[in-house]
Image (cartoon, rainbow, N blue to C red):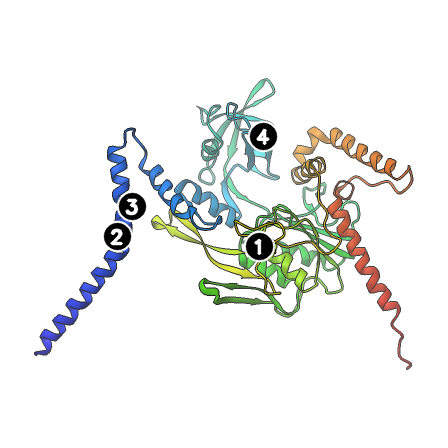
Amino acid sequence: MPSRNLNIILLTFCFSLLCFLTHRRAKPAMLVGDALDLINNHYVDPIDEETLLIAAMNGMTSILDQNCEYIPLDAYASFQDSMSQEFAGIGIYVEQPDLTKPVRVVTPLVGSPALRAGMMPGDEIVKIDGEDVAKLNLKEVSARLKGPINTVVYVVVRRDDQELSLSIDRSTIELESVIGDYRDAKNEWVYRLEDDPSIAYVRLTSFGEKTEGELRTVLTQLNNDFRGLVLDLRGNSGGLLYAAVDICDMFLERGRIVSTRIRGGKVYDEFDAQAGTLVSNDKPVAVLIDGNSASASEIVAACLQDHQRAVVVGTRSYGKGTVQNILPLQYGRSALRLTVARYYRPSGKNIHRVKEAKPEDEWGVRPNDEMEVSLDETTLEKLSKRWREASYPSLAASSALQLHVDEQALENESTEKEGGEGEELSVGGLSLDPVLRRAVEAIDADRAIDDEQNDNVVPAAA
């Protein structure tokens, strides 16, 4: 057979195989596409094609674990903002507890264009650029407030019985993920406890692209000038795996931080600490967690607990031991959040809580022995209020008197329980937060053990 004919046969075979494989991949997509067309053309009521697509994607991800999801076009940009820790806007937190009423301002961020323009907590947003938005929902109002940097948005707010017109310049708003106990007179975070400045206090609200750099700056400035450190991860739902790894490395000289395994239990990646720390090994560390501490928060808590580098205080964590990748769709306009691996703590355990898990099963990160401390609803509300007002001083002005009354009542109650004896608690986090108090007690106990061991050391004769 001539070689030319053989080449033609080989090319035909390769082309046929390619068509077959392409058809196998395209067949399910064609089925979904045909169903969308049939519904769109023949369903008794008109229905938006994008709504159908989202429903189809949600249906596929619903049979996977609870951390997989389709991120549609209108949500993907916000998701990217949260990971990059910045967005273009006016810098406010808003809420809409009553859908029949206008969206209202929770607080303008410190240093934000909204704060400079005079926007205040409690303002109701009724008009944006001349359009009545009093009956629009939260998503629609937020979308109208955002826009290109260096553009102006004209907002009318209702404050008490008055309507005020504000001209606000849009700019890049950077979201903080590393915060302290309170702000000073210059609106700068203080990373020490207000009640006890010898204890360093750092709260992480997320694990974003800038979190590692933010924390590195804070720890460098503190320069180990403290008797102990509290790392507060309560309410932190996680974020980037690499941010958690880098933060663990700030506390460890050596050892495994976390490993990940893909389909079939095959080890995909292993992360180890590098020599050198930002927090000296002789400085006690307490990590605070609760039921909303998840993912990257659990990586940090589990790693430092397994290496006995920190004591974990609070309540059992959420139990999210899986790793998700964000896979772009529609040329980067939407995405699929897909679980691609499980992570394992240094002890070799996976802390993921499966759907059918029971309380007695092994999942999540548990506090150390005698370190489990829970908060009742009243205490949690007071603590949340203090956190908000510490973060945004504009909130404190309107409720400073009530905050003082609440804390004074708490102090009086504590004194009564102790029979009128004992030292009066100062106004601050320690007076409100039993989890924080237990953490400080653990730090003091750790230092007391170290001091006792040092006292028992007999110097050699020279």
Mark carried by residue 27: 2
- The amino acid on which the numbered mark 4 sits, given as a three-letter code, is Met
User: Which of marks 3 and 2 precedes in the sequence?
Assistant: 2
- The amino acid on which the numbered mark 1 sits, given as a three-letter code, is Ala
User: Which of marks 3 and 4 precedes in the sequence?
Assistant: 3
> What residue is disc 3 on?
32
Q: Quadrant of the C terminus?
A: bottom right
Residue 234, x across and y down, in percent:
65, 47
Q: Is residue 449 visible?
A: yes
- The amino acid on which the numbered mark 3 sits, given as a three-letter code, is Val
Residue at coordinates 64% horizontally, 56% vertically from top-left?
301
Camera-side mark, 4 or 3: 3
Q: Is residue 213 above or below residue 271?
A: above
User: Which of marks 1 and 2 precedes in the sequence?
Assistant: 2
Residue at coordinates 59% horizontally, 17% vertically from top-left?
161
Camera-side mark, 1 or 3: 3
- The amino acid on which the numbered mark 2 sits, given as a three-letter code, is Lys
Mark carried by residue 296: 1
Residue at coordinates 37% horizontally, 40% vertically from top-left?
55
User: Which of marks 3 and 1 precedes in the sequence?
Assistant: 3
Query: Would you identify the image quadrant in which residue 343 lies?
Result: bottom right
Q: Is residue 216 visible?
A: no
Cα–Cα span, label 4 and label 3: 48 Å
Residue 44, x across and y down, in percent:
28, 29
> What residue is disc 4 on?
119
Residue 305, x across and y down, in percent:
67, 60
Look at the numbered discs 2 and 3 and tell me whether their residues touch, using CB distance below 8 Å: no
Look at the numbered discs 1 and 4 and tell me whether their residues touch, using CB distance below 8 Å: no
Q: Is residue 405 above or below residue 271?
A: above
Q: Residue furthest left?
A: 2
Q: Is residue 174 left or right of residue 387?
A: left
User: Which of marks 2 and 4 precedes in the sequence?
Assistant: 2
